[in-house]
Image: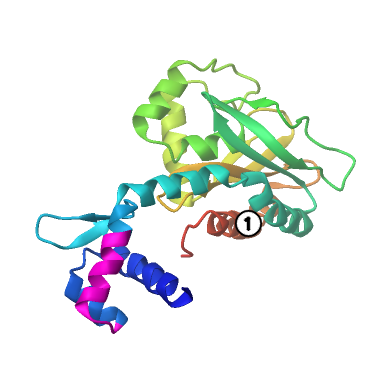
Amino acid sequence: MTQSVDRAVETLMYVAGQPRSVGDVANRLGVHSTTALRILHTLHGWRLLEKRPDGTYRLGAAVLALGQRALESLDIREITAPFMRELHAATGETVHLAVLENGHVVYIDKIESKHPVRMYSRIGLVAPLHCTGVAKAILAYLPSAEVDELLSNADLVKHTSNTLTTPEELRADFERSRERGYAIDDEEHENGIHCVAAPILHADGSVAASLSVCAPEMRVPRDRLMSFVEPLRRAVAGAAAGLGRPAG
């Protein structure tokens, strides 16, 4: 039984690379073509493989469904927690995890700063789309049409003198964020508080969440804040790997 399972799994992994024929699979497994055909037929019956008109096999719809269920079962907070702790240990400042839900970016986890002066935020709070690091990091990696729709429904209120309040300014800022690989909240939401934030990406490049490090400017000047970028990059890369995104 174990050998049969091993062969079936190896066949799936082999076919995942590109469509394969019965002969290809037989050679790969080192078995007779009738054995390879039996394995392929079983996987086809479970819709894990699909037979093409030319007789080769490719991954079937059931694999896609399983992949989607696997993604849905992943708890982004659980996956990200150890990397949030590492980021907090490296910076000593407030670390946030946020996701896009129903058109809003929501804080879903937080580790408080070790210092007495902190920014106001809490789990469950909605982060303004146009002036918080976590939100800007997410929007910078969304499709343009989705960004346009989100901004058209957003209340682009000016919270500080640095707040960007037009779609044109924000799109330019998102472009800079993509080029850098991280977003900056330059005291745009709260006077005296600045942040760096980066997206956590799924294997397909879509945005799963974002992480930020925020600190008071009076204690953490700009050059010190920028030194948090590398530990931030490591944290989002580690969380992305937990979601199946390859390193690099």
Q: How is the image coloured?
A: rainbow
Residue found at the very far right of the displayed protein: 116
Residue at the spot x=42%, y=31% of the render?
Answer: 171
Look at 42% across and 37% down and name the residue there. 142
Q: Residue at x 28, y 56 (%)?
A: 44
**Picture layout, residue 157 above or below residue 215:** above
* Magenta-highlighted residues: 30-42
Picture quadrant where residue 130 is located: top right
- Please report the residue visible at 62 percent of the width from the left and 45 percent of the height from the top: 75
Q: Which residue is mark 1?
A: 235
Relative to 187, is 58 on the left or the right? left
Asked if residue 194 is positioned above or below residue 226 in the image, the reply reads: above
Question: How packed is label 1: few (under 14 Cα within 10 Å), some, or many (20 or more)?
Answer: many
Q: Is residue 210 visible?
A: yes
Would residue 201 appear left or right of 20 to someone viewing this image? right
Tell whether position 36 is magenta. Answer: yes
